[in-house]
Amino acid sequence: MEFRNKVHHDKFSGVGVEMDYKDWIEFSDKGLIAYGAYNIWITKDEYDFGYKLFSYKYHSPLRLLEEKENIKLLTNTDLHRMFELLTSMHELGWHPRPISIFNHKSISGIKIEKAEEATEELYNNRHRDCNYEGLYDLLNEGMVGYMAKTLGMHNHGSLNGKLVIIDVDSETLSNYKIGRTE
């Protein structure tokens, strides 16, 4: 794939594909689950990777886990764009390596390398030690500023002693401005 510095013409759809709760129960069986406002992370201690599901609506993961509701996940097109964004962020050293897109019945997401927990020292020194410039080529200035200033320590991890951002979600994708072409 060749990297092109241009605005991507395919817009973020924001439509979503409904995930069936029964499929979720089967898929998440015995995994460790963490969630945020838009994402669900499933892994096991012995894995060096996890599965991330990306939802469209704020607090969808909470509705899935507590209210047992079906939720909408990224469409196939948006999931591929998310994979491109995460790959680009990984190439810049800002995100764990996305491994592959996966599908399990009505569930789809991205298998991603696990990061270690961010240390307080790495997080507290992020403005001194981190150069967010590479992200400005991928995301609009407001999103990079939000990631640099607002995201809490729990939204970061570390790889090889370097701070990485692990909270990349559908809101981030809606601010993605670079595309990849063959």
Image: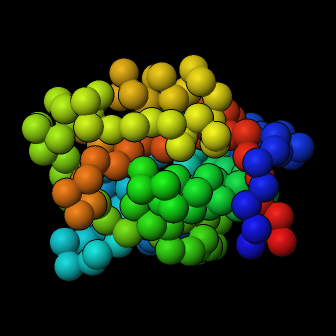
Relative side of 157 to 2, left or right: left
Q: Residue at x 56, y 74 (%)?
A: 100
Residue lying farthest to the right in this orientation: 9
Relative side of 147 to 125, left or right: right
Relative side of 157 to 4, left or right: left
Visible in this render: residue 173?
Answer: no
Looking at the image, what colour scheme do you see?
rainbow
Q: Quadrant of residue 93?
A: bottom left
Q: Residue at x 26, y 37 (%)?
A: 129
Q: Out of 110 and 181, give the one closest to the viewer.
A: 181
Residue 23: x and y in percent read: 53, 66
Q: Quadrant of the N terminus?
A: bottom right
Q: Residue at x 28, y 75 (%)?
A: 48
Visible in this render: residue 131?
Answer: yes
Q: Quadrant of residue 61?
A: top left
Image height check: is 161 above or below 6? below
Relative side of 100 to 129, left or right: right
Image height check: is 157 above or below 102? above
Q: Quadrant of the C terminus?
A: bottom right
Residue 123: x and y in percent read: 20, 36
Q: Residue at x 48, y 59 (%)?
A: 90
